[in-house]
Image (cartoon, rainbow, N blue to C red):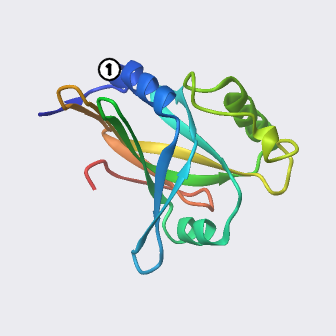
Amino acid sequence: MTTKVGTFAEIEDEFNRYVGSIVYATMVTVDANNRPRTRVLIPVWENVDARPVGWLATFPTPVKERHLANNPHTSFSYVAPPGLSTVAIDAVATGIDDLDRKSHVWELYRKTSPRGAGYDLGRFWTSPSDPKLRILRLDSFRVQVIRGSDLRSRIWSPETVTNQTRTGSAITEPANK
């Protein structure tokens, strides 16, 4: 049975425990013809104003960039044995160019956030200012955690969702869309 929770805080410990132990997430984007594409990545997450905000350090590959430019909505899925507990996150991705913000994300990856999720970005990029480093902000609008031992499912979503496009404009729409 699925239960909707009123605040992210109600599932935050479980979210952090699962994400921190699973680490790798499958990211889904869609192309202009609504065909999905998946890739396995390691995002990091933090609580910002009582909402889960993710950050993805990645290379600006043409396919991913084209997909997100056309439709910034994305999904992340974490799953791992033995109990097959899972986390599913729906979010809006926005590219970040601000060096202070990129430095913040560099540090989140270094210290791992949540604990266990992250790595030394210096393995792939020289610094936060490396032009090959693409940082995506992931504004969650739905998070589901499922405990594998008994399939208890809990979902968090805010009452309204603010979608930010790459141009920075904001549109508010009902969360159930």
Kindly identify the residue that appears in the image at 31 percent across and 35 percent down.
84
Residue 127: name its quadrant. top right
Label 1: few (<14), some or many (≥20) within 10 Å?
some
Say left or right for 38 vs 79.
right
Residue 140: name its quadrant. top left
Q: How many marks?
A: 1
As helix, strand or loop, the secondary structure at mark 1 comes to helix
Instruction: Find residue 99 and report its horizontal and vertical position in percent.
Output: 81, 42
Kindly identify the residue that appears in the image at 46 percent across and 24 percent down.
16
In the image, residue 31 above or below residue 105: below
Quarter holding the N terminus is top left
Instruction: Find residue 166 and report its horizontal and vertical position in percent.
Output: 61, 61
In the image, residue 145 above or below residue 166: above
**Of the pair 94 and 27, the residue shown nearer to us:** 27
Say left or right for 27 vs 4.
right
In the image, residue 10 above or below residue 61: above
**Of the pair 169 and 4, the residue shown nearer to us:** 4
Quarter holding the C terminus is bottom left
Residue bearing mark 1: 10
Say left or right for 55 vs 103.
left
Kindly identify the residue that appears in the image at 55 percent across and 60 percent down.
165
Instruction: Find residue 66 and report its horizontal and vertical position in percent.
Output: 59, 72
Say left or right for 62 vs 99.
left
**Of the pair 55 and 121, the residue shown nearer to us:** 121
Amino acid identity at mark 1 = Glu
**Of the pair 24 and 173, the residue shown nearer to us:** 24
Q: Residue furthest bottom?
A: 33
Instruction: Find residue 131 and report its horizontal and vertical position in percent.
Output: 84, 56
Q: Residue furthest front?
A: 82
